[in-house]
Image (cartoon, rainbow, N blue to C red):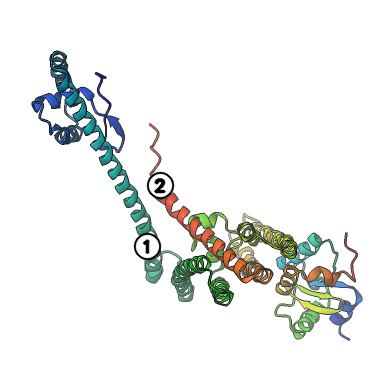
Amino acid sequence: MDKVTRLASENGLVLFSKSSCCLCYAVKILFQEIGVTPTVYELDQDPEGREMERALMRLGCSAPVPAVFIGGKLVGSTNEVMSLHLSGGLIPLLRPYHSMC
Amino acid sequence: MNSPTPQFVPSRLGIYEPIHQIGIWGENFKSNGNPNTSTSVIVEVDNKLENESETTSHEMLTASNNYKQEASKPIDKIQRRLAQNREAARKSRLRKKAYVQQLENSRLKLIQLEQELQRARQQGLYMGGVLEGSHIGFSGTVNSGIAAFEMEYGRWVDVQHRQICELRTALNAHISDIELRILVESGIGHYFELFRMKSTVAKADVFYVISGVWKTSAERFFSWIGGFRPSELLKVLVPQLDPLTEQQILEVCNLKQSCQQAEDALSQGMEKLQETVSSTVAGGPVDEVSYIPQVATAMEKLEALVSFVNQADHLRQETLQQMSRILTTRQAARGLLALGEYFHRLRALSTLWATRPPEPSLP
């Protein structure tokens, strides 16, 4: 099992990011606003970062980061997360994995 | 009743000032008490003001002499003169009213012409492209991308205006929901078309989209990452949608909240991008001549701007989509009308602002 899939299934909410990526930063802020804390992996700080990027692209992401996984399943990038949130689907999806205040 | 009523006539400066009242009396007597003096009085007075060099002191003297003579004349002649004066005043007021009406019409015409001119100028400017010296890109494709967008956007606004009128008519005519749905779908589709256009031109020049130079000035005032704020959209729409069901109120409330959160997230992401670019450009020793490394790195970082513009448009699109889902056909139609009308009014505001009379310069 490749590293990405393994890491993604270890926690309820997983975000693959890059520390220099401002769009990733925006997604982090969004989770903060909702009141959830994702497990974040910064690919630019991971020795296997390049390989992980390629793995994410193979999974169907148009851009490797930001990539959001909920319950081990790929939700998508910023587009998908925003759409999900506006349709009211993001919070219910997160509920089993995070206690919300 | 012996004092004459003040008369007002527009001067060359457009300021309404009282005519020298003695002057009118003077004119009346000069024309030998002719019962039809009223119109000639006005004409005379106009000429007076036109010339400006008229000294009224002489007239005041002769008029006051005439006025002393006047006191000894029979009552009915006095009455007649008063009536003539009233008639003159009435006609003067009518002329003033007609003049103001004419001014108003001219002003509206001017506004329309200004709008046409601006649109034509933008199109002409970008068709001219490099020759005009604006939006000079280092590749021909940048110019043509912007030129194409300018033309398409001009058409987009025209279609938008037509759609608003159709919606208004349809809502007042109480057409069937099925027919109304068609209008709603094309209305929403029209906004999606704009987002597609923006996405294309953002690839050509993202700064162009973000600058909002393609919009009118009042619209630009509200600009957020190259367009309107989705939360703003909801603020404009929701009051127009009453009555909403309990369920709808709840869903709209949730949408407002999630929209605001997404907006905040993107706003903060943009701030981070600004900080990053700024520190990259400012970085490195300034006593060295070459800044190429810093600028080159900054170029890479700026690539993210395109993503942000796309995300902002995506948020706008999603907001519209969700509202369309929550609302009934009729409510959606009213919402689209409200939104379209709002932007139409912002554009009118821009034109009016641009054509307002200049402030008088301080001495």
Per the image, label 2 sits on a secondary structure element best described as loop
Per the image, label 1 sits on a secondary structure element best described as helix
Q: Is residue B318 visible?
A: yes
Give how far apart the Cα atoms at labels 2 and 1 are. Answer: 17 Å
Q: Nearer the viewer, residue B264 or B290?
A: B264
Q: Look at label 2 and name its amino acid.
A: Arg
- The quarter holding residue A77 reads bottom right
Crowd band around label 1 with a 10 angstrom C-alpha radius: few (<14), some (14–19), many (20+): few
Q: Look at label 1 and name its amino acid.
A: Glu
- The quarter holding residue B42 reads top left
Q: Are marks 2 and 1 in contact (CB under 8 Å)?
A: no
Find residue B263 and report its horizontal and vertical position in percent: 69, 61
Residue at point 8%, 26% (across, down):
B32
Q: Is residue B11 visible?
A: no
Q: Is residue B110 left or right of residue B56?
A: right
Crowd band around label 2 with a 10 angstrom C-alpha radius: few (<14), some (14–19), many (20+): few
Find residue A75 and report its horizontal and vertical position in percent: 78, 77
Residue at point 49%, 61% (across, down):
B215
Dot label at residue A26 = none
Q: Is residue B318 left or right of residue B341?
A: right
Residue at point 53%, 58% (across, down):
B342
Q: Quadrant of the C terminus of chain B?
A: top left
Q: The residue marked by circle 1 belongs to what chain?
A: B
Find residue B60 and report its horizontal and vertical position in percent: 17, 19
Give the labeled residue for mark 1. Answer: B116
Find residue B160 and report its horizontal and vertical position in percent: 49, 68
Residue at point 16%, 14% (across, down):
B71
The answer to whether tags 2 and 1 share a subunit is yes
Outermost residue toward the left in this view? B32
Dot label at residue B356 = 2
